[in-house]
Image (cartoon, rainbow, N blue to C red):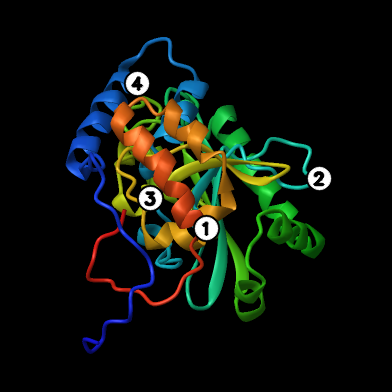
Amino acid sequence: MTKGILEKTYQIVVPPEKAMPWDAYVAIIDQEWQALLVKTDSAEKDFQEFFERHTCCLPQMYPVFKRGAHGPYPGAIISQPVLPDFTRKVPDFLYVTRDSATVYAVLIEIEHPTKPWATSAGQQSAEFTQATNQIADWKAWFNDSLNVAQFQKYYRIPSDWIQSRTFEQRYFLIYGRRNDPSLTEAFNKKRKHLERENECHMTYDRIQPQREMDCLCAKLDGNGYRAHSIPPTLELGLMWAKEGKMIHDKETAIRANRYLSEVRKEFLIARWPYWDAWNGGGLCDSEDCE
């Protein structure tokens, strides 16, 4: 056996058609994003649906907070996530990530990009205040240890993660544009100071695809994580053998994908059950999988 290479216990197959290259996908995203930003009759749900299709455009935690270097667990970002027994507005998106010391729940609120930052008097607008108040509500909810325990159970966070790490939250607000007339030089200087602890407020102009966030979008139902969308760049392999099996109804999400050819769809549908059933073993990182 070659030194440093463990015995391979899985089988790989050559797909009849490879996944979409990242650069080609970025070009598609950019075209859709620019069209959406200039759409005069857009609604907030249009942006929600865009981010559901293209999770890689949602903000990554590590570049902002310098914590939580691992990708979203279990390979998915959750749309319209439930906070158990929470009766007010839930976040638009949520993902769970971790590093060696901490597990993080990352909550994301999106507001329509035309909402103003400030009033004509230079004070923060009612729309902006409402958005930040929603984040305050979520912070208060997580401040209750019983709610935290419910959250960890509901999102099936592995018990060994919780036992060996602390649990914290981070919050993103995607709001407004840089060219908003209300975002005067004076208010822009003040804007950074309106961010509270563990928060990041960012404009829509900062949105860009990030490979590290290129994963499934899921929703939770009575059976756990349900696939809502998959990226056309997805390649099956070792990472899906552990966490991918937690996500059900993947076939529906594959068939609904507008960017995949029928050949690629049929391959993914036929092949993914193999990785769901694979129980692990020795790995060989020098080979690509599918």
Q: Residue at x 22, y 44 (%)?
A: 22
Task: For label 3, count other residues whose C-alpha is less than 10 Å away and answer few (under 14), some (14-19) or many (20+).
Answer: many
Going by the numbered disc 2, the residue's amino acid type is Asp
Residue at the disc numbered 3: 213
Amino acid type, label 1? Ala
Q: Residue 14: x percent and y percent?
A: 24, 50
Q: Using the image, determine if residue 129 lies above or below residue 66.
A: above
Instruction: Tell me the crowding category of disc 1: few under 14, some 14 to 19, or many 20 or more residues within 10 angstroms, Cα based.
Output: few
Q: Position of residue 215 (x, y in %)?
A: 41, 47
Indicate which disc, 4 or 1, sits on the residue closer to the N terminus: 4
The answer to which of marks 1 and 3 sits earlier in the sequence is 3
On the picture, is 59 further left or further right than 82? left
Q: Which sits in the foreground, 135 or 215? A: 215
**Front-lying residue, 149 or 119:** 149
Say what secondary structure mark 2 lies in.
loop
* Picture layout, residue 115 above or below residue 192: above
Amino acid type at mark 4: Leu
Q: Which residue is tagged 2?
A: 85
